[in-house]
Amino acid sequence: MKTSISKKLFKLLPVLAVAFFINSITFMQVSKAQENEAFKSAGKWLVGLKVLNLDPDVDSVTSIGGEAKVDDDTVPELDIRYFITDNIAIEAIFGTTEHSVSAVGTALGNVNLGTVKVLPPTFTLQYHFNSESRFLPYIGAGINYTFFYDDNPGDAVGISYKDDFGFALNIGFDYVINDNNYFNIDIKKYTLSTDTVIDAGAAGIATASVDLDPLAISIGYGWRF
């Protein structure tokens, strides 16, 4: 597993986001401030460029015992939001991560299973709360379809991953900088699984059912159109 200052900072973001979220709720009013009303108007687009950390929370069952380990990765991310109403938006996010994979404590010992790239485009329906603060909190839920590609089997002869649908819960906030720009922190918790087939050569074929259930934390800057 990778350990770095950037990862530790990302681990703190959920706490900060919840604190800002609670702060924003405190200032909520039925009537919105004029600047925020304009910022969240129906028909507006928000486009963000962010840094995303995707950290799997792995639970696995393998045919050779032991457990799977999958490290985290930090990459650029693009998100696009469209406001259907002043409070309801649809969001699409795009980013691809690369993860080191291993199996530990198996009948074959600890096995390096190389790397795999993950592309999980996610579509979310969000509710944006009214607020007179510059902090504009939201919650949401959505679906994604995860593609596994460009796998390197490491010590194995070959490996394959099954693509699959998943779900995501979402919480976050925008901080209004001016009429056309904002800062964003976003947290998504996914339910995501894959079935893996590993060709271990002379040792035979091994299989694994892996729940990845990653936590995705992103932070970045955006533009309103």
Image (spheres, rainbow, N blue to C red):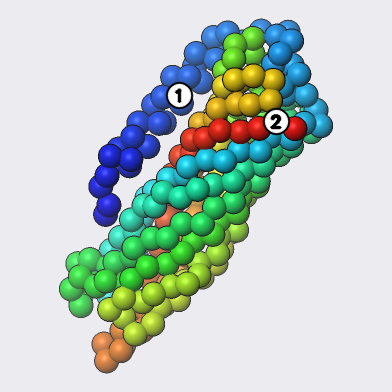
Residue indicated by mark 1: 18
CB contact under 8 Å: marks 1 and 2:
no
> Vertically, is 145 above or below 20?
below
Q: Nearer the viewer, residue 7 or 199?
A: 7
What is the crowding at mark 1: few (fewer than 14 residues within 10 Å), some, or many (at least 20)? Answer: some
Question: Residue 115 location, x and y as percent?
Answer: 37, 68
Residue at 26% in and 71% down: 112
Q: Residue 108 falls in which quadrant of the image? A: bottom left
> Vertically, is 196 above or below 57?
below
Q: Nearer the viewer, residue 43 or 30?
A: 43
Question: Residue 155 location, x and y as percent?
Answer: 27, 78
> Nearer the observer, disc 1 or disc 2?
2
Marker disc for residue 182: none
**89 left or right of 213?**
right
Residue at 18% in and 73% down: 109
Residue 142 visible at all: no
Residue at 25% in and 47% down: 3
Question: Residue 33 location, x and y as percent?
Answer: 70, 9
**21 left or right of 88?**
left
Q: How many marks?
A: 2
Residue at 45% in and 76% down: 160
Q: CA distance from mark 1 to mark 2?
A: 24 Å
Disc 2 residue type (three-letter): Arg
> Vertically, is 27 above or below 170?
above
Q: Quadrant of the N terminus?
A: bottom left
Q: Quadrant of the C terminus?
A: top right
Q: Nearer the viewer, residue 27 or 80?
A: 80
Question: Residue 44 location, x and y as percent?
Answer: 77, 31
Q: Nearer the viewer, residue 16 or 107?
A: 16
Q: Residue 99 falls in which quadrant of the image? A: bottom left
What is the crowding at mark 2: few (fewer than 14 residues within 10 Å), some, or many (at least 20)? Answer: some
Residue indicated by mark 2: 224
